[in-house]
Amino acid sequence: MHNYRFKRQTGKFGVFVGVTAHALRQTTPPMRADHISGRVWLDTSEVTDGFRGTSLTLSQNQIEWLQTGLRHVADAITGAEPTAHLVVVIDALEIVEMDYVDEALAPAIAGWAAQEFGFADRPVDIRFDDQTNQCFVSWPG
């Protein structure tokens, strides 16, 4: 289990989120987890607030952004671990409300996966549109 902290700061926009997770390697598909791709799964059933140590219930939007981040790196994960079903278990999130947007969970879990499975972390763009009040995440290339 290890922690990855995603941070970005621009003149107008700052974002921070920490993800603590671990990977379970199984010979069979898990009974309770979200299927991401091929042999990659996501378990968000028991997440803790990384600062307070209390239980944290994730919204559907937060879960979807974690799924998006894992889908983006699923091929790299299975390339690094060619034999087992891999369940990424989210243990804790570090959320500072004033510097947090759900969208940052995607690059945070992708960065965590790069560290965990030993592939290169891919550059990511995250920007906030003042006109629409929305955040956008994209991976160039």
Image: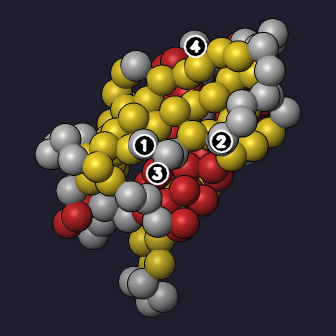
Q: Secondary structure at mark 1?
A: loop
Mark 3, Cα crowd under 10 Å, few <14 / some 14-19 / many 20+, is many
Mark 2 or mark 3: which comes first in sequence?
2
**In the image, which is nearer the foreground, mark 1 or mark 3?**
1
Q: Earlier in the sequence, mark 4 or mark 3?
A: 3
Q: Which disc number belongs to residue 105?
A: 3
- Note whether residue 123 is visible: no
Q: Which mark is residue 33?
A: 2
Which residue appears at 34% of the width and 39% of the height?
Answer: 92
First of labels 4, 1 by sequence position: 1
As measured in the structure, the alpha-carbon distance from the residue carrying label 4 to the one carrying label 1 is 25 Å
User: What amino acid type is highlighted by mark number 1?
Assistant: Glu
Residue marked by disc 4: 118
Dividing the picture into quadrants, the one containing residue 123 is top right
* Helix, strand or loop under label 2: loop
Q: Which residue is mark 1?
A: 46
Mark 2 in CB contact with mark 3 (< 8 angstroms): no
Q: Is residue 122 visible?
A: yes
85 versus 71 height, above or below: above
